[in-house]
Structures are given as C-alpha cells and as structure tokens.
Image: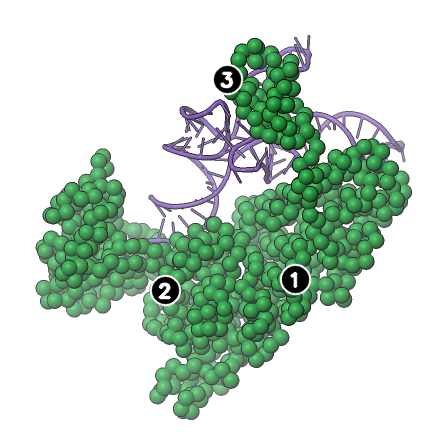
Chain colours: A green, B purple
Amino acid sequence: MRNIPSYDPQSLEAKWQARWAERHTNEPDLDRAARPFYNLMMFPYPSAEGLHVGNMFAFTGADIYGRFKRLQGYDVFEPIGFDAFGIHSENYALQRGINPAELIPQNIATFRRQLRQFGGMYDWRHELSTTDPAYYKWTQWIFIQLFKAGLAYKKRAAVNWCPKDKTVLANEQVIDGRCERCGTAVEQRFLDQWFFRITQYAERLLDNLGNLDWSSSTVLLQRNWIGRSEGAELIFETPSGKQITVFTTRPDTVFGATYLVLAPEHPFVEELTAVEQRSTVKTYQREVQSKDIVSRRVGDRTKTGVFIGSYARNPATGEAIPIWIADYVLMEYGTGAIMAVPAHDRRDFEFATQFKLPIRQVVAVDGEPLPSVSEEGTLVNSGPFDGVPCREAAGKIVTWLAARNLATPRVQYRLHDWCISRQRYWGPPIPIIYCEKCGAVPVPEKDLPVELPLIEDFRPDDTGVSPLARHEEWYFAKCPQCGAQGRRETDVSDTFLDSAWYHLRYPSTEFPDRPFDAARTKKWLPVSSYIGGNEHAVLHLLYARFICMVLSDLGFVHFDTPYPKFRAHGLIVKDGAKMSKSRGNVVVPDTYIQQWGADTFRMYLMFLGPFQEGGDFRDEGIVGIRRFLEKVWALVHERAAGAGEGAAAKGGNDVVLQKLHRTIRKVTGDTEALQYNTAIAAMMEYVNELREHGAGSTELVKPLIVMVAPYAPHVAEELWEVLGEKQSVFQAHWPSFDERLASAGDVEIAVQVNGKLRSRLVVPRGMAQDAVLKIVLSDEAVKKFVDGQPLKKVIYVQDRLVNLVV
RNA sequence: GCCCGGGUGGCGAAAUUGGUAAACGCAAGGGACUUAAAAUCCCUUGGGGGCGACCCCUUACAGGUUCGAGUCCUGUCCCGGGCACCA
C-alpha cells in the first residue's frame, strides 16, 4: 500500500476559502450573466450568540442547491446580508448597556467569519445590512411611496402593547396573547399608529397563492392567516331609525336571531343606550378596556355582557330583539356587531343560557342536538323558507332581504392592516414631518435618509413615545412644504418592512442613487429559488408579497411576486425544544467545524433526516460522514497514484458503470428536490460499490467528485485538483446519465404465490413477462406452492415482482 | 373547537407514490491485522420457531378495499405545528 496524504480538513478548507476569494470564484458577472439564477436564503438576524446549528442547517441546504444549480451551468448569484434592526438587537444592547450601533457590527463580524468558515458560496461584494443608512434610505423611500399611494395611514387604534419591551406589536407578533420576543402578557392600548393597507390586497394575496410554487404547508398557513369568510351583511333597524349592520356567515339562520350583540367599543353604543342603563354600560365598558388582551381573548372565557336597554328589529321576523354589548364580540372583525343565533352557535348559546335569553331552533338536522352548527340541515321556524336546505337558503334569504335593502353579500377577511409603527429606537425613522398647517408631510426624497441619530439614552419608556422624542435637535425640523417649524415622526418602522424588499437590493448594492437598478432587476428578479423557515410563513413572506404587489402596481417592478418558488426547511431542535439561549440548549457549530471540518459537518446536518422536515440535533452519527469522505479521499489518491488500474480484471467495470449512471440519476433528482439525505445515501452506495469492485478508471470517480461538490465543496475542490484538473470543480458540468446504462444489468425480483413471497429471482432488467414466467414456473420453491393448480391470474411488474394467483 | 403534518428495528431514517419493509448511516456483538490500543477491513444484527434447505409474525390500534397495503378508505389512540370568543 502506497502512502497517501492524510485528509486534514482544517488546512484544506482554509486553503480553498482563500482561493475562492482570490479568484472571485463566487462572484458572477451581474450584468452579463447568460443564465442568471438568483439563489436566495432568508438572511439572518445577527444575534450575539453567533450562528447556531439551526442557521447552519438552513444555510447549508440552500447553499447546496445554489452550488448544484451552478454545476448545471447557471450563473448563480447567492448573496447574504443581515437583518440587524429590531427589538431583539435593541433589547440585547439594553441589557449590555451598549448602543446597538456599536454592538451590532461586532455581531455581524462574528457571523461573517462563521459564514465564510462553513463554506457558503456567497458573493460578498453584495453583502448588505438593513441598518446601513444606504439601505434604510430606501426602506424609507418605500414608506413614502405607500404614503403617496394612500396605502399608509395613521389612526388611533387598540394595539397590542408589550409592557416589558415597551412597544406596540403587530398581531403576528403576539403568540397566545404574549409577546413573541419576551413572553410577557400583552396589554391593550390606544395609540396613534401607522398602518399599511394590506387588507386592500387581501383578495389578491389569497388568489395569488394559487400561482406559487411553494411548500404546501406554507401556502396553507398563509391561506388560514388571510382567513376568507363568505357571508352577508344584514341590517337590524332600531325604532329611532339607526341601522345596525352585522356580518354573518350564516344568513340562513337569521330567523333564529333572538338578540344582537355589539362590541363594547362599538360607536353606536352611547347613542343607543337607554338612560337607566347608562351607568351599567359605562362600568362594563371600563371593565373591558382595563382587561389585558390575554384574559379577554385567551384566558377565562366565561361570557360577560350587559343589556343596553334598547331594541332592534330582526329583518326576517320583524320582531324587536334586545341589544347587548359583550366582549366576546370584537370591534376589529366584521362590523363589530353580530346577530346572535343561540340555537346554532356555541358562543351565542353559552351567552343566551347564562343571561336567560330566548333560544329558537331554525335548523333541523337528523340526530344532532342543540346547538347544532351544521350546514347540512334544513330550515324550520323560518316562515316562507321552511324545508329549504341550509346551503340553498343562505342565498335565497339574502336575495329576499336585499330587495328591502336589508342585506348585502359580503366577503370578510381575518387579515388586519399591518401596524408598522414601533415606539423604539433601533429602526429606520418613519420619514414624516408634522406641520401645524400642512399636517403629515413626507420627507422629500432628496433629504433621505432620515438618519437615526446616535443617542446615549435609547431606553424606551412607558409614555408610548419613542426615545427619539427626547432629542430636540433631531425632533424639530422644518416643514418640507411651507418651511414652518415642524416636528418629526418619532416612531421607527417594523423590522418586517426592512426584510420585505431586501431581495430587490442585493443585486443593486453598488448603486447609491436608486433602490434597485432597472436593468439588474430585470435580469435577476424575481428570485429563482427561496429557502427559509416556516416560522416566517405569515410574517415576512406575506409582507414581502404585499410590498411587491404595491411596487408592481406603482410601476417600479415588472412582477408582483417576489418569490415564485419557495421551500420551507425543517426546524432543528434540541431535546425536543427550539434552541434558545434561555433554555440553554443552543448548539454552536464552531466546535464541530473545528473538530470535523465544515465539509463533514455540512454533510452530516443534511444526512440527519429530510431537509424539509428537520429534527432533533444529535451528533452520534457524524463519524459516518467522515468515514465516507475519507473513503472518497482514498479512492482518488489511489487512482492518482496509478493504483487500481488493474481493477477491471475483477470484471466489475460494467456493473460499476451501470451503478454510476443509476447514482447520477438518483442524486440529480434528489438534489433538485432538496432530498439531500437520500442523495447522500446514494453516493455512499456508489462508493461502497467502487470499493467492492475496485474502480478501474478515473472516469468512474470524476462524476462522483462533481456530485459531492455541492455537499462538501472544499474536499471536492482538493480532490478535483489531485485528479489533475486546473480549474475549480465548480467550472465543471454536473454529470448526465445514460438511461440505457442506468437501466441495464440484472435485478432481483420477488416471486409471490397468492401474494405471499415464496422465492427471489435474478433476471436482466426489462425482461418480458413470458420469459420470466417460464423461469418462475420451473422454480422448485414455486412449484411446491402452486401444487399443480391452474393459474387464475398472473401479475407482473417489470423489474419488481411476479405474483401467481391460483 | 377548527385546519394541517406525523407515528416504521436499540437509534437517525429509506421504501420507485399500491409491488421483495427496514436501503444508507450510527450503535452493539464476533473475527482479522497489531506486543497493545487507535485506525482500518470482514461477518452478524426486527421478533419468534426449527438440526436443517425453510416456516410463522411484524410499519400506533381495530376494521375494510385489493392478487398484493407502511402507502388507499372508515373509526380510535398518541405526538408535533398553525389558527382561535373571527360571527
């Protein structure tokens, strides 16, 4: 046995990372690329803990895909950046007592080092950070475009307020009534807030989902989030002539509406309250307002409410029904008022039972007790509509009431407008100046960016006003319209606005005078492949689609979908729980990379299980991948040293060649589908085959190195060089397979009698039924079970099995 | 409560979408090499029965469809995720 150099990942990986940088290997020509492929992965938030295994799992999966596409001949642009604004960073800075402007660059430096070390194919010329004024200038510009288009507006609203982070949260950031970041119970506050009119796009955002090549789980999450309900608005009139509009998905049950419930904040409440009920109503309203959102929505759901002392007419029955207010009716959904049908709605039933309100059954369903909510029944106690099936009745009743202008068909969405204000420091200031005379005036484009000043006391307080308001030199500004003394908007915008357009910036980072260059955008967008976590299914991914639609409508981009293809990767957890610093279960990749090398660790993470499913992190099997790479290493070096040439004598070349082509077929398909675990298994099988038969020619090894390259890029480069190649392995072509060779050779097929496995048979692939049957029938084991009986049926599946039914 | 996933050896997992269940890897046991260890290589490894070529059982559980079911259908039980007084 000849000496071969030992595999030393540390020096080898450093060597190739340096060479990639020197030779600009990962920097496509963005202007002249012939086959542009924009490979995007969700950019990280640069936490102080550095990159954890979960990040690395995601980035590796995306990087493999990019490298694979590159080997298939695409000009792959794989950028990376940092989503560095936001509460998370700011809180950490507060805790450390250091300004985030100082702290974040340190975190980014750590991330940069780690991202280089793991071997991502990043084009570092186009790195970006959302905290860079050259970036957020354009985030502010986008805000102004929405403002000008009437899609950004300010209103006083009940908002989610986190008392610990001292800021407003979007609905999407409230999980089980608690702050997504810190877990504190969220309170209800009334503040002036900036909103984006995403609800105006609800229908398009929903319809558009059908055109996307996205992971189905992500589509489903978004569909549920947008929450479309079909129904009708019905009008209940009071004796004073006030029209109360309710939204219902079950207009067919209107004959069973025995009372109305308004949200306590409903604007009609004051006017409709009878004199003798005023103090009761006021007390109840105050009670509800002081409740935090957790107990109103999540906690104890015992029904509360009060009768306001007046009545409205049921449009179907004409009878006067009492009006109540109760906090189970929400002002934010529908019209803030409902018709209560206690016989057929669980909540109304509870309420009616508690307050002894009448319950009238109007739907009869066989065998179902009250309160049945089924739409399968037929109407009863419903005047002219008795006996009509529910589904049919809904439309008929709406038409009947519409004739008297008491009903309108209506589609309702669960989606709310996007609240983008944050009363915090660490974000892009919202570029608005308030003027006594002119009102809210956008900062002119030439004055952008409105830079975030470096201030000492960035600590938020309980006032609901951003710390920026405490800085007069920044706070006061001239009105851009009339020149009078004005004051700046002190809120900053939500981080999700930063990340809603970053894919547009990457190809255009070198242009200071435009958010995205027209030619570059035309060439590279929309994104070819996007990979990220499903935790962003309803946040980032929805906002990015919305912003893209707006920019498209305003004529700034030529497409309305930023990510036509998206794949959600699975989550890597530790001991069944999400990795987090507070749980103390964060696994840091650095130690593994030091011990095993980036190649082994990358491949190991991909071999753990299906990329799109994720799983529990453990490190027991990592040595298996190392052994695999060592075997490939040895194969190449032996070949390069001239050994193994005599292997053809073992007569395995044909078999190996056929296996090679099957392997190429398998690895190509699996890599394209992000089924990296099975692709790796196929390569292992091939290596085992090579070792068993002894590969004669380097032609049997070269395609293997190319297939390994996306997974373990450093060692692949090294071995490619050992094989005498002068250029990077990423200049090579992904191997193609010959279907004839892939389906040549022998296979073992199963022989069943009456569906039970009785024998196995080795035959050439593609053998005809007759020929197989002939062999099978002479098989002793089979004869025994057929036992001379006539064959009733023969089932033959080529290359798989034959089943004799007797 | 509603909507999605998922339940396969000691472990991570495969299974051409209805066709040989457990590929690939880890761990374990046995052997070779070695003064020894590590590394490496070879063999065994779902359960049960038989001296034996072989036979029976096995994909959470109970049924069903089919020549044939991990895969499809019905019901049940667990685990994970999303939504949730959304009218």
**Quarter of the rendering containing residue A770:** top right
Q: Label 3 belongs to which residue?
A: A792
Q: Earlier in the sequence, mark 1 or mark 3?
A: 1
Q: Which mark is residue A75?
A: 1
Of callouts 1 and 2, which one flags the residue occurring earlier in the amino acid sequence? Answer: 1
On the image, numbered disc 2 is attached to which residue? A199
B24 up-or-down from A706: above or below? above
Q: Is residue A3 visible?
A: yes
Q: State the CA–CA distance, disc 2 to disc 3.
A: 64 Å
* Dot 1 alpha-carbon crowd within 10 angstroms: few under 14, some 14 to 19, many 20 or more: many
> Amino acid type of disc 3?
Lys
At 25% from the left edge and 41% from the top edge, which residue is drawn?
A: A376
How crowded is the residue under tag 3: few (<14 C-alpha within 10 Å), some, or many (20+)?
Answer: few
In terms of secondary structure, where does tag 2 sit? helix
Which x, y percent locates residue A670? Answer: 61, 45
Q: Amino acid at mark 2?
A: Thr
Q: Is residue A96 visible?
A: no
